[in-house]
Image: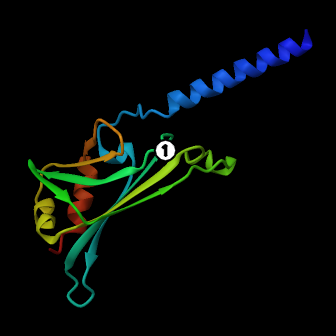
Amino acid sequence: MRKKTTILVFFISAIAFYCSYTVFSYDNRTANNLSAYCNIDFRGVVDPKTTHVTGATLSVVDFRYDSRPMEKNFIIDVDGKTYKIDNIEISAQPPTYSLKDFSIGKCFKHTNTLFVTFPPQILKEISQADTVKVSFNYLGSDSAIELPLSTVDLQYWKNQLSSL
């Protein structure tokens, strides 16, 4: 009887683990702006000789249970004008299984980083924009992640580009 109980508990545990992994492998997050969905870091690049902004970079770091990597596809919509950015780099790191990362939300999650270098012609438009939307997607995904910047983030981007 004890052996049957042990086997039953093992199978129930295995099924529960599989089901929880299946549920968490899908991205069910909801967000109304980009920084609510993932970590972002936008930086203006300043020429030290002239102290003018000569470029800008954006780093998008997304933590997710799904192991699919990001596609090398980045689209920015500035006040209705859409631009596909080709100058991007992507990195993917496997999840950590350390309990020290549990409190910061990285435990069991894949880390995907997208690094974008913006062409100068778009920066002027961003610095005067009312709305900016960013779009990227993952390999094998049917839908893109398309989210606007919050008003606070948009103002931060404009401040980074203020010496254009």
Q: Is residue 28 above or below residue 131?
A: above
| Coloring scheme used | rainbow
Q: Is residue 21 above or below residue 68?
A: above
Q: Is the residue 147 above or below the residue 15 in the image? A: below
Q: Is residue 11 left or right of residue 36?
A: right
Q: Secondary structure at mark 1?
A: loop
Q: Which residue is mark 1?
A: 67
In the rendered view, tell whether residue 138 sits above or below residue 143: below
Residue lying furthest top in this view? Answer: 1
Q: Nearer the viewer, residue 98 or 4?
A: 4
Q: Residue at x 22, y 73 (%)?
A: 55
Residue at 34% from the left image edge and 38% from the top image edge: 141
Q: Residues within 10 Å of mark 1 (few under 14, many from 20)?
A: some
Q: Amino acid at mark 1?
A: Ser
Give coordinates of residue 54: x percent, y percent: 20, 77
What is the x, y in percent for residue 116? 29, 63
Q: Nearer the viewer, residue 144 or 54?
A: 144
Horizontal and vertical percent position of residue 157? 24, 61
